[in-house]
Image (tube, grey):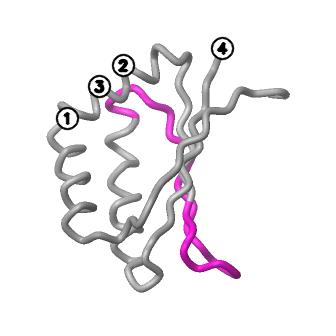
Amino acid sequence: MTVTVQIRYMIDPFKRDAFERYARAWSSIIPRCGGDLLGYFMPHEGTNNIAWALISCDSLAAYEAYRMQLHVDEESLANFAFAQRERFILSEERTFLRPVVA
């Protein structure tokens, strides 16, 4: 069963450019580490401090393997360090979803 993780980010609205740089970096890292990146989504109209990411894996076990791979990938570690250094992510929440209709 495919599992999709939805990540809801609360970001600093004055550092949206930094978050966008962070999100773009994942476009090559996530597939290389085993995830299927459905997309990162930035605020456009309305609320200016909430962003989203959707990443799918074939199963929860595949998701766990993907997460482990992120923690040894050099580019991934550099992107995590960039986020910590620049402090543009104020909080994040993960919700695991399953498809109803495909």
Q: Please, what is the three-letter code of the amino acid marked with disc 2?
A: Ala
Q: Which mark, by number, is residue 65?
A: 2
Whether tag 4 and tag 1 are in contact, CB under 8 A, the answer is: no
Q: Which of marks 1 and 2 is nearer the N terminus?
A: 2
Assign the C terminus to one quadrant of the image: top right
How would you rate the neighbour count of disc 4 (Cα within 10 Å): few for under 14, some for 14-19, many for 20 or more? few
Tag 1–tag 3 contact (CB < 8 Å): no
What's the amino acid at mark 1? Answer: Asp
Query: Magenta stretch?
Result: 31-51
Query: In this figure, which residue is indicated by the disc labeled 1?
Result: 73
Above or below for 82 versus 54: below
Q: Distance between the residues labelled 2 and 3?
A: 5 Å
Taking the view exactly as shown, the residue that stands out farthest to the bottom is 14
Q: Is-magenta flag for residue 45?
A: yes
Is 51 left, or right, of 102 in this rendering? left
Q: How crowded is mark 2: few (under 14 residues within 10 Å), some or many (20 or more)?
A: some
Look at mark 3 in the image and give the residue it sits on.
Answer: 68
Counting residues from the start of the chain, the first of labels 1 and 3 encountered is 3
Find disc 4 in the rendering and name its residue: 1
Q: Position of residue 29 (x, y in %)?
A: 32, 41
Disc 3 secondary structure class: helix
Q: Which residue is drawn at 27% across and 61% down?
A: 83
Labels 1, 2: front one:
2
